[in-house]
Amino acid sequence: MAMNRSELVAAVAEKNNLSQSAVNGVLDALFETFASQVSKGEKVSIPGWLSVERTDRAARTGRNPQTGESIEIPAGHSVKISAGSKLKAAATGK
């Protein structure tokens, strides 16, 4: 079962005796900061929890699955998210 954003906001607000709108504002600011830093090519790291960074993808030749025709796929960027030690330990139940 997955927790959606509204459930996350409600849980954090309840744990910290904050309003849901305050927690929602903090999450918005957090994700905006992630986006702006990653778009600049900078890594964002929260030690023990996670790191987010932009990766480069080289140009390559692909194939259209419907026609079998070769196509050129341009170089681009992607995002890599890595779990930290505390998050990995929580996942394994340690």
Image: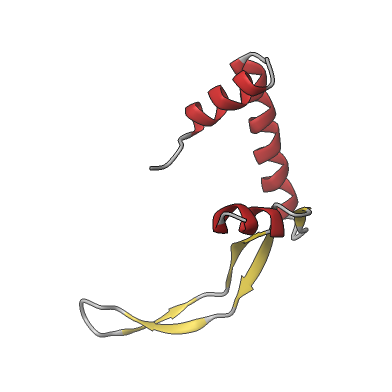
Tell me residue 13's x, y (percent). Answer: 62, 20
Rendering quarter of residue 80:
bottom right
**Numbered marks: total:** 0
Residue that appears at 65% across and 32% down: 27
Horizontally, is 91 left or right of 25 in the view?
A: left
Residue that appears at 70% across and 32% down: 29
Tell me residue 89's x, y (percent). Answer: 64, 57
Rendering quarter of residue 94:
bottom right
Give above or below for 59 relative to 50.
below
Give above or below for 20 relative to 26.
above
Tell me residue 26's x, y (percent). Answer: 69, 28
Tell me residue 6's x, y (percent). Answer: 49, 27
Residue 32 or residue 61, whichever sits in front = 32
Give above or below for 73 relative to 93.
below
Horizontally, is 28 left or right of 10 in the view?
A: right
Give above or below for 23 relative to 67.
above
Residue that appears at 56% across and 26% down: 11
Residue 84 or residue 91, whichever sits in front = 91
Locate the N terminus by quadrant: top left
Give the colouring mode of the picture. secondary structure
Name, please, the residue furthest toward the left: 66
Residue that appears at 65% across and 40% down: 31
Rendering quarter of residue 61:
bottom left
Horizontally, is 67 left or right of 3 in the view?
A: left
